[in-house]
Amino acid sequence: MTCHDVRKLLDESAGCAVPDVVAQHAASCAECAALVAERASLEAAVAAALAGVTQIAASDADGVSRTQIRASDAELAERVIATLPREAAAPPAPISIWPRLAVAATVLMAAGLVAWQLRPVVPANPGAAAGSATGGAEVADARPYPLAPPQVDDYLGPRFIDVTDQSGIEQFDHTGMNGAKDWMVEVVGHGAAVLDMDGDGDLDLFVPDGNRLDPAEQVSGTWRLYRNDGGMRFTDVTAGSGLETDAWAGGAVAGDFDADGRPDLFVPCFGENRLYRNLGDGRFEDVSEAAGVMGREAEWSTAASIGDADGDGDLDLYVSNYADMRQYMVEKGVGRGCRWREMAVPCGPQPMVPQRDRLYLNRGDGTFEDASDDHLPLVARYSFQSVFTDLDGDGSLDLFVAADGHPNLLLLNDGRGHFTERAREAGLATDAEGRDQACMGVAAGDIDDDGLMDLFVTNFSHEPNVLYRGRPAPPGRPTFVDVTRGVGLQQPSFFTLGWGTVLADLDCDGDLDALTANGHLYPGVEEAAATTAYEQHLSLLENEGGGYFREVTSAAGSGVAARRVHRGLVAADFDDDGRTDLFATVLNGRGVLLHSEGGEVGGSLRLLMRRKDGRVEAAGARAIVDVAGRRQIRDLLLGSSFGSSEDPRVLIGLGASESADVRVRWPRIAGQPVVVEDFGTLAQGGTYLLVEGTGAARRIR
């Protein structure tokens, strides 16, 4: 065991606890003993600082009992800071960086404990004590204004430049009125979808829109379809496309549901959902009712994902539902009936009634079966983004669903589209401390090259985003561990509020970096919480190898650092230069297109994976790529981030290598063994079409 191993184990342990294996090793290693002694000292100091905190039992307007802390955040943080070593800036040489890391982790741990108690948005209770869950002093922190990312001097990766003005993209969001918002549906927003609508090889962009609650203020014809003309330039081709509507969208996903070789569009909505069949000439036909995927008017659908759930080779649809918002508004009559830190805010998710999600199985004839009752567990959640990917290693596509204020869902597939809920057993239901979080966006990918899928989930402000790392486990029993603290992800996301997120190889060095789109729920939130803001930057976290991250936002270009009220986020190579570009939606603002420029970026290739007919996207197919002795796995996802649908081509970063050996593990057909197909050595710089069963890769660009 090395000192690096010791530090890693200490970082990954809960709180300030010392793992047994480290304690045993310390007996024979002086440097390890010093680290353990410092950890034990900090643990004792924190316990002493928090001793004597007065707790009281209280009930909110729903009658739900909550524990409330009378001491303010600032008082608790002061107690912790006062106990920390005064010479942390100049420690002994053998442990030069560790004390500073320990100090930061300890302060954040204490702040996180208090922030959790303050987090819930609860119905207003004028009699609540100061410092309770309905208000209180702000979290103290030793850093400057926390939303300002740390300065980075040695970042060598790409910069992201805002090219929206030159691009022709002029989409403007209309989700609720700009300014004060009364109801939860007005603050959520939506994502966007990337698709090659016309088959020319360029990635086009579909951006749906929200609407207004007041009938007198409602707008129509605001959804936008942009044709990619090359060179990061787009033309608005919405007129005559069949996509003109006044529906209130929650996002969009693109996939070829009818197997005609053209990607169609599904749009989850506040109200009845929409499915548009691509006619191939720039026009889309609304087939929602005939296809049987409209859902119900009372449902609020927030996101969707696409995959072959039942193993028959075509694309099925999972739709996330949140709550019966319309009935709640009728019952309450007046909005902003809750409080967050003394601020009047829209209520949500509690006390609204959560809704069940829906699974639509493709019959192959243009219609779908609503299989929700027979194929899904009888659970209701405040659901946001879902993602189809194989999480237990059997070749069938499972589902992870991010839930707001409820335990997340892990739906394991029996291979024929029947799902069993196993999130708690797998370690995915909550964070490491067993707390439900306000989970919204999801990205899936192998961040540490161990051949197992990991999940990155965005959360509310004053609680960090969470990285669930997959661990080796027996077949059918996936195991994940919340490693947020130990890999550099807690501090960068503690004060931001994350929505869309992607794991993408931005510098093409062979590992996955992380991006999040941030923006708060509440206009004017700065008045109630000085450590956050309504408009927030994107966050870029560079993977330094092995799944350890550092925030490089400040050095990654003005397009990333600019503050907006972000919601959806998609990553796609819009100009086919081998780099990943970005598009983000902005609540009540103009969507933003960011071009990847400059920096040290390696070579890459792109994979377009399709089923046996060569037409339908092989959603969930897993590329197994060997590059210079290193193995990457990359899944084709259709529906992730937040209300969004990503580049249907999988980008593979090659670094300095000129080629890669590529195999594909195809999604398992029901009743048949898993198939892994070899496609040989592919050269850097190309886009390759890989069709199931052919064994040959065809370069198409």
Image (cartoon, rainbow, N blue to C red):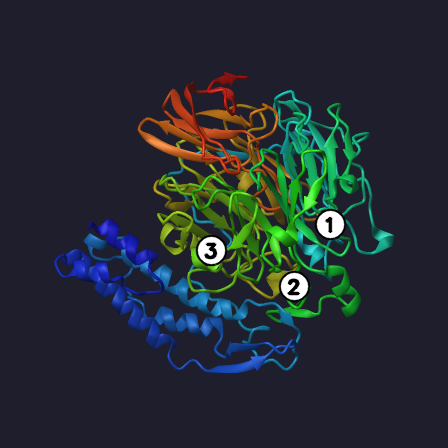
Q: Is residue 24 left or right of residue 341?
A: left
- State the image coordinates of residue 642 (x, y, percent, origin top left): 60, 46
Pointer 3 local density, CA inside 10 Å: few below 14, some 14–19, many at least 20: many
Question: Which of the two discs, 1 and 2, sits closer to the camera?
Answer: 1
What is the spatial separation of the Cα atoms under label 1 and label 3, in whole angstroms? 28 Å
- State the image coordinates of residue 409 (x, y, percent, origin top left): 53, 55
Q: Which residue is mark 2?
A: 348
Q: Residue furthest left?
A: 28
| Front one among 77 and 196 | 196
Q: Residue 428: which disc?
A: 3
User: Of the residues shown, which amino acid type is indicated by label 2?
Assistant: Gly
Pointer 1 local density, CA inside 10 Å: few below 14, some 14–19, many at least 20: many
Q: Quadrant of the C terminus?
A: top right
- Mark with earlier residue (1, 3): 1
User: Of the residues shown, which amino acid type is indicated by label 3?
Assistant: Leu
User: Of the residues shown, which amino acid type is indicated by label 1?
Assistant: Gly
Q: Residue 295: which disc?
A: 1
| Front one among 451 and 372 | 372
